[in-house]
Amino acid sequence: MALFKLPFTNKSTNKDSKEIHNSFEKIPEHIAIIMDGNGRWAQKKGLPRIAGHREGMDNIKRIVKIANHFRIKILTLYAFSTENWKRPTSEIDFLMKLPIDFLQHYLPELMEENVKIQTIGEVDDLPGNTKSAIMRAIEQTESNTGLILNIAINYGSKFEIVQSVKSIYKEVIHGNYSIDEITEDTIAEHLYTSHLTDPDLLIRTSGELRLSNFLLWQSAYSELWFTDTLWPDFNEDEFEQAINDYQKRKRRYGGI
Ligand code: FPP
């Protein structure tokens, strides 16, 4: 694994120091990932779909570690969408147990790595034991200052936008502000992500080329990066490749 190929420091005094400084500054602050392809990964190996989800869970730990090394500030992972409730009950039950397993196994390591766990989505509607495992992890990692591991769970972007509109409407009828005062910032301030910057880079694995109701508002100017690799096989080298490609992109935000 070519872990330190990207420059981590701008302290170099050699003739390349300016270039190193620039590259360092272009590390994306927020990376969002649609972790797709667990089922196909398992199928290809003749295993049940849940084996793919378990492998996908283990991969989260590897990617969190490297994201932290790259000094990414926020890593948002799409773990369970509001549409995933349509899956067979047995698969849903398994997916709901994964955060519990993940935190049981990896919380000490995440603490050591100074990772802070947060969520976006309707966590209140999760099964009680899943919710309490997550809430405990959020509480325990609250003062950590490293990577924010933001888990999108029971998350749907359209639902999130509707909720935002509803709470703005309530504030308008309470006279907190007028309709004319509603701006793009007002909408953004009422999303789950109000405290976070928008994703700079959005990665989707498994060859699917769509956003699937993930961060629709927040990804308006995100750089998109797709790979055919199935999530359990998405490794550190490919993550680094995505960051390298991002560094070469010119972000114009509609300007020239
Ligand atoms: C998409 O693959 C993946 C999911 C719906 C679940 C992703 C969840 C994890 C990787 C683990 C979550 C764990 C924690 C700790 C948050 P798919 O099943 O749609 O794959 P397919 O398209 O090949 O069928």
Image: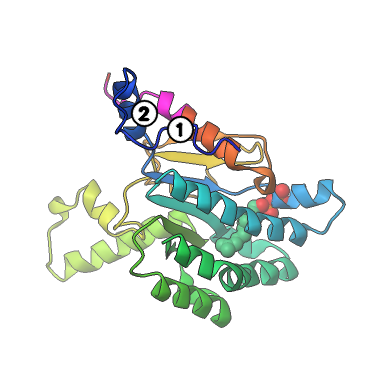
Q: Note whether residue 121 is visible.
A: no
Q: Quadrant of the N terminus?
A: top right
- Pointer 1: residues within 10 angstroms few (<14), some, or many (20+)? some
Establish if 128 lies above or below 255.
below
Q: Position of residue 22 (x, y in %)?
A: 31, 27
Q: Which range of residues does the magenta coloring cover? A: 245-255
Could you tell me the amino acid type at mark 1?
Leu
Q: How is the image coloured?
A: rainbow
For residue 6, the mark is 1
- Tag 1's secondary structure? loop
Which residue is at 30% across, 57% downward?
A: 194
Between 155 and 41, the one nearer to me in the picture: 41
Prevalent SS, magenta region: loop
Establish if 226 lies above or below 92.
above
Q: Quadrant of ligand 1?
A: bottom right
Which residue is at 55% across, 39% downward?
A: 239
Q: Position of residue 174 (x, y in %)?
A: 16, 71
Q: Which residue is mark 2?
A: 23
Q: Is residue 169 left or right of residue 134?
A: left
